Image (cartoon, rainbow, N blue to C red):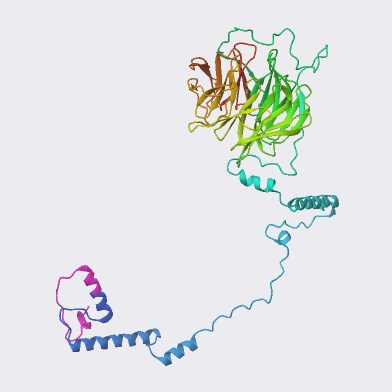
């Protein structure tokens, strides 16, 4: 730095070893202040020469660049006078400008059509209809607080957030319709199409053997979505009732050409369960639209439309001794109830209220003097008919929910589809207790309410599972007798043994098919 002509008088250079970082600092100091740190303090004449050099350098920079020295008042005033005047700010308006309505002049407003004429204008009648609809909606919102309508959605939010909303004061059932697909509704003797053929025996004779089916012999097609339940007609089994997730019910011919004879449509949502009257002259269906409908089997007319206090119904059954009495298992997030109606008046006559969560099934036992109810609260109650107080309460820590219950043909036992992949068995007499040795295992039913069916002689038990398989157990030994791949896509949700044919079994699944196995 001090070499050559710019080397001040009296300066000297010394070769010394120094680290990289201190050298970089001293090098910068030497360029800025014209001296570097040494082991000995520099002489006074060296410091004075360095100060004079800095002053000369500052004066040369100021003269060359038009700059100024710190503290030069005259130069500061001259610089301020030569600087341009600051830019004036735009004055604000006195008030907001009227830009028009957002609907007519906003960014989403329709583009005005210059060629539009009077023929494109909305008729006055249509404007009046729109105004009337708006007034109706406003009046609906201003008609006052109702506890049942405003709080039940909050109470059911935990378990029914995927279900259709509960009914309000304006909810009405959909229009029902029916269609007959047979040749004629009455024969030449005046008998209806659903009458049993003559010459059939009404029951299986004592000691008649039953056999396990081996293959599928027929497929019933016609439902638009999955089939939820199949119920053969009692005694003869000449017809079969099926319900589907497409909101319809169908009655099929079983003994002859195996085609659909009549379709019943009356639910806006999927049909969940059905029940035939003891004489099969009428049947009941419940759907996810929270309506219960009673149909006339022959004509397809709707006899009654009922609601269970706007709750979701899971099971429906006719009282075996009187087909004018109907029971339905329902519930919400905080309770499970069983509603009883008299179909002659359509009025609710009794409510069995003891479950803490939705009730799933109702099954009559003990010569129809009482019934069994199960629910999502993993409890089993034994009731006497027409007495809203349970006579027995079954609840154990190891128990699971039982959505489906089936009574054996001997009326001595009933089996429940437990959701821990087992089927449990209980006695069905006056003393209800679990038979732990009769527990059927091997299938997968967790999460599915798969139906069960006994053979007419009570020797075999059949059940579907969540993988589309059909299992057969020996009821005496609880051994798996046979399993079949009944349905490929989805579960085998229900099965039913034919009441007369010893080796006929019906199955249905969410693939939309009903299969007959022999």
Residue situated furthest bottom in the rendering: 74
Work out whether 96 lies above or below 499: below
Do we see residue 222 in this rendering?
Answer: no
Q: Nearer the viewer, residue 183 or 324?
A: 324
Confirm whether the magenta stretch covers residue 13: yes
Q: Position of residue 10 (x, y in %)?
A: 16, 86
Confirm whether the magenta stretch covers residue 12: yes
Q: Answer with left or right where residue 91 lies relative to residue 190.
A: left
Question: Which quadrant of the figure has residue 299?
Answer: top right
Q: Nearer the viewer, residue 18 or 352?
A: 352
Query: Which span of residues is magenta-colored?
Result: 1-25
Work out whether 263 lies above or below 74: above
Q: Position of residue 338 (x, y in %)?
A: 66, 33
User: Who's the residue at 61% across and 36% down the image?
Assistant: 354
User: Who's the residue at 54% across and 84% down the image?
Assistant: 85
Q: Answer with left or right where residue 137 lies relative to residue 469.
A: right
Q: Nearer the viewer, residue 26 or 10?
A: 26
User: Who's the residue at 73% across and 33% down the image?
Assistant: 349
Q: Answer with left or right where residue 193 lies relative to residue 336.
A: right
Q: Answer with left or right where residue 339 lies relative to residue 487.
A: right
Q: Position of residue 164 (x, y in %)?
A: 65, 40
Q: Position of residue 37 (x, y in %)?
A: 20, 78
Do we see residue 344 in this rendering?
Answer: yes
Question: Which quadrant of the figure has residue 239?
Answer: top right
Work out whether 390 lies above or below 119: above
Give the main secondary structure, helix, strand or loop, of the magenta stretch.
loop
Q: Quadrant of the N terminus?
A: bottom left
């Amino acid at each position: 730095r001090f070499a050559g002509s710019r080397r001040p008088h009296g300066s000297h250079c010394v070769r010394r070893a120094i680290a990289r970082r201190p050298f970089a600092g001293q090098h910068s100091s030497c360029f800025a202040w014209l001296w570097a740190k040494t082991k000995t303090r520099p002489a006074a004449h060296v410091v004075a020469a360095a100060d004079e050099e800095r002053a000369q350098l500052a004066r040369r920079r100021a003269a060359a660049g038009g700059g100024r020295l710190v503290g030069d008042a005259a130069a500061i005033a001259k610089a301020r006078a030569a600087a341009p005047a600051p830019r004036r700010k735009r004055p604000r308006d006195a008030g907001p400008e009227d830009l028009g309505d957002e609907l007519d002049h906003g960014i989403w407003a329709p583009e005005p059509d210059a060629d539009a004429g009077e023929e494109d204008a909305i008729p006055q009648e249509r404007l009046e209809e729109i105004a009337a609809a708006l007034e109706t909606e406003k009046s609906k919102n201003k008609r006052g607080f109702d506890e049942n309508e405003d709080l039940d959605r909050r109470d059911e939010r935990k378990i029914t957030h995927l279900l259709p909303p509960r009914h309000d004061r304006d909810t009405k059932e959909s229009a029902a319709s029916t269609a007959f697909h047979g040749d004629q509704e009455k024969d030449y003797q005046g008998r209806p199409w659903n009458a049993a053929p003559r010459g059939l025996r009404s029951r299986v004779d004592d000691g008649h053997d039953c056999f396990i089916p081996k293959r599928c012999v027929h497929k019933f097609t016609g439902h638009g979505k999955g089939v939820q339940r199949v119920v053969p007609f009692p005694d003869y089994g000449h017809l079969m009732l099926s319900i589907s997730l497409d909101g319809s019910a169908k009655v099929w011919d079983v003994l002859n050409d195996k085609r659909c004879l009549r379709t019943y449509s009356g639910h806006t949502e999927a049909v969940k369960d059905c029940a035939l009257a003891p004489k099969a002259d009428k049947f009941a269906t419940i759907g996810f639209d929270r309506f219960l409908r009673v149909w006339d089997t022959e004509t397809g007319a709707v006899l009654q439309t009922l609601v269970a206090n706007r709750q979701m119904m899971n099971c429906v059954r006719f009282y075996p001794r009187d087909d004018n009495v109907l029971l339905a298992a329902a519930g919400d997030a905080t309770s499970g109830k069983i509603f009883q109606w008299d179909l002659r008046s359509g009025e609710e006559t009794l409510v069995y209220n003891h479950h803490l969560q939705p009730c799933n099934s109702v099954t009559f036992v003990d010569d129809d003097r009482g019934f069994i109810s199960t629910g999502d609260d993993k409890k089993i109650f034994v009731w006497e008919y027409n007495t809203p107080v349970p006579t027995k309460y079954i609840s154990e820590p190891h128990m699971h929910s039982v959505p489906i219950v089936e009574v054996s043909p001997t009326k001595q036992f009933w089996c429940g589809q437990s959701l821990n992949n087992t089927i449990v068995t209980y006695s069905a007499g006056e003393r209800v207790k679990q038979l732990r040795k009769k527990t059927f295992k091997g299938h997968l039913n967790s999460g599915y309410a798969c139906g069960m069916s006994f053979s007419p002689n009570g020797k075999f038990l059949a059940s579907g599972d969540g993988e589309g398989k059909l299992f057969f157990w020996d009821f005496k030994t609880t051994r798996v007798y046979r399993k079949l791949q009944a349905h490929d896509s989805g579960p085998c949700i229900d099965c039913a043994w034919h009441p007369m044919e010893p080796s006929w079994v019906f199955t249905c699944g969410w693939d939309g098919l009903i299969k007959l196995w022999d």
